[in-house]
Amino acid sequence: MEGESSTSQASGSSWAAFLKSIASFNGDLSSLTAPPFILSSTSLTEFSSYWCEHPPIFAAPAKEPDAKKRAVLVLKWFLTTLKQQYASRSEQYGNEKKPLNPFLGELFFGKWEDEAGTTELISEQVSHHPPATAYSITNVPTGVHLEGYNAQKATFSRTINIKQIGHAILTVPNPAGEEPDKYLITLPALHIEGLIFGSPFIELEGASYITSSTGYTAKIDYSGKGWLSGKKNSFTASLYPTGKEKEILYNVSGQWTKSFDIYPGSAKGNSKATLIENYDPAEVPATTLTVAPIEQQHPLESRRAWSKVAAAIAKGDLDAVSIEKGKIENAQRELRAKERSEDRTWERRYFSWRTDAPDAVLAALGSVVGVPDHGDADKTGGLWRFDAAKAGKERAQPPLGDEEAAKIAKELLGQ
Ligand code: HC3
């Protein structure tokens, strides 16, 4: 299934029916009934890993004593994540598929081991209506920590347009032992191209920002084919002292799927002499994420929970896909009804809904990049922050026995 690349292998009529259905689509991405060849067996909780496929680049700012250079290293890291986030699936499979819509409480854990040491990922589905995924990524040796949450608002106008709601916060410990830097990161809007040809892929649009507690802001402007550069996946970015957009300290331009150049100041130097760095993803291999074998995973861990659906997708058995998905959806519906009748809500395991407004980082930096103090909590089911105390308790739990795991799978997932 995952190897198929376009409608050529699927019936043209099922794609035509899909196109017709999205033209009258109501904004709920999970309600789109996609033809089998466009179904992915990867859940959106896994997408959090795209933030850190190059841990050494993620951790690098912690070793840089100069605040301005730390800010450009953070910008560089962010730009390197775009290819994984938005193009890795279409490059691998030939098209952007429809991911699995996570259930509330779904978990995804992994770690990267490389020259940057161990970097840990925790991802949790913290809201189902509206769907929102939260994540925490920590490079253990340096303490560089990323956390955030995101939801999507989709509309249809010529194609599927997606606005990302949510933000990320990167904390970089100060090499001189002063207060750690905080970087507030906004997420780019995107739309789907190639729909009509049955080979959908993502193009980014508009602008996104990174603003820091050290007084620097980066603006990234995205454009695609037919725009200024005429090349797909293009961007230009500049780093400037916050509030002084014209005083450009660094500028970066290129294609987020191919390569980009970092220059000092505002001149887009043509000569290699002024070039600070040319980043080419083809020359920097990604570190593989290690995930526990399915049988050792918690029943709510993504790959274990969706394993039967994934097997049905791999076989192209749509009936089995809908039966297995239905089991999870029904069990979750019953669980929500039970919680309502007992006047309680699902306890998130690693993140907490922060109500102590205003959030300190958003209060200090949010207005620079248009993130409200409440972090759009109404559209993401809450303002979610990593809860180290909860995580500590979870880590201290002994592994589940087979009986206990089976009970959870039955009650929570109908399996
Ligand atoms: C829009 C999207 C789901 C959301 C995906 C997000 C925004 C999730 C957070 C990640 O950090 C970045 C990211 C990358 C890809 C986004 C997905 C692309 C397509 C998918 C739609 C739900 C599917 C649309 C259907 C079809 C057939 C066109 O693929």
Image (cartoon, rainbow, N blue to C red):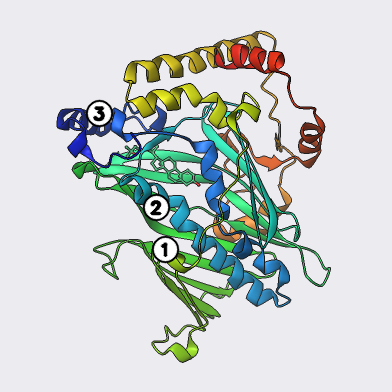
| Picture disc at residue 87 | 2
Secondary-structure class at tag 3 = helix
* Residue appearing at x 54%, y 61% in the figure: 78
Seen in the picture, residue 402 relative to 62 is either above or below; the reply is above
Q: Using the rendered view, name the quadrant where residue 162 is placed.
A: top left
Give the side of residue 20 with respect to residue 124, left or right.
Answer: left
Q: Are marks 3 and 2 in contact (CB under 8 Å)?
A: no
Secondary-structure class at tag 1 = loop
Seen in the picture, residue 39 relative to 88 is either above or below; the reply is above
Work out how far the residue at label 1 is from the one at label 2, CA to CA, in angstroms: 9 Å
Q: Are marks 1 and 2 in contact (CB under 8 Å)?
A: yes
- x and y percentages locating residue 269 in the rendered image: 42, 86
Give neighbour class at mark 2: few <14, some 14-19, many 20+ (Cα, 10 Å). Answer: some
Give neighbour class at mark 1: few <14, some 14-19, many 20+ (Cα, 10 Å). Answer: many
Give neighbour class at mark 3: few <14, some 14-19, many 20+ (Cα, 10 Å). Answer: some
Sequence-wise first label, 1 or 2: 2
Work out how far the residue at label 3 is from the one at label 1, CA to CA, in angstroms: 31 Å
For marks 3 and 1, give the one nearer the viewer.
1
Q: Amino acid at mark 3?
A: Ser
Q: Which residue is mark 3?
A: 21
Q: Residue furthest left?
A: 13
* Residue appearing at x 50%, y 63% in the figure: 79
Residue 58 visible: yes
Q: Which residue is mark 1?
A: 256
Work out how far the residue at label 3 is from the one at label 2, CA to CA, in angstroms: 25 Å
* View quadrant of ligand 1: top left
Mark 3 residue CB less than 8 A from any atom of ligand 1: no
Q: Amino acid at mark 2?
A: Ala
* Residue appearing at x 56%, y 47% in the figure: 49
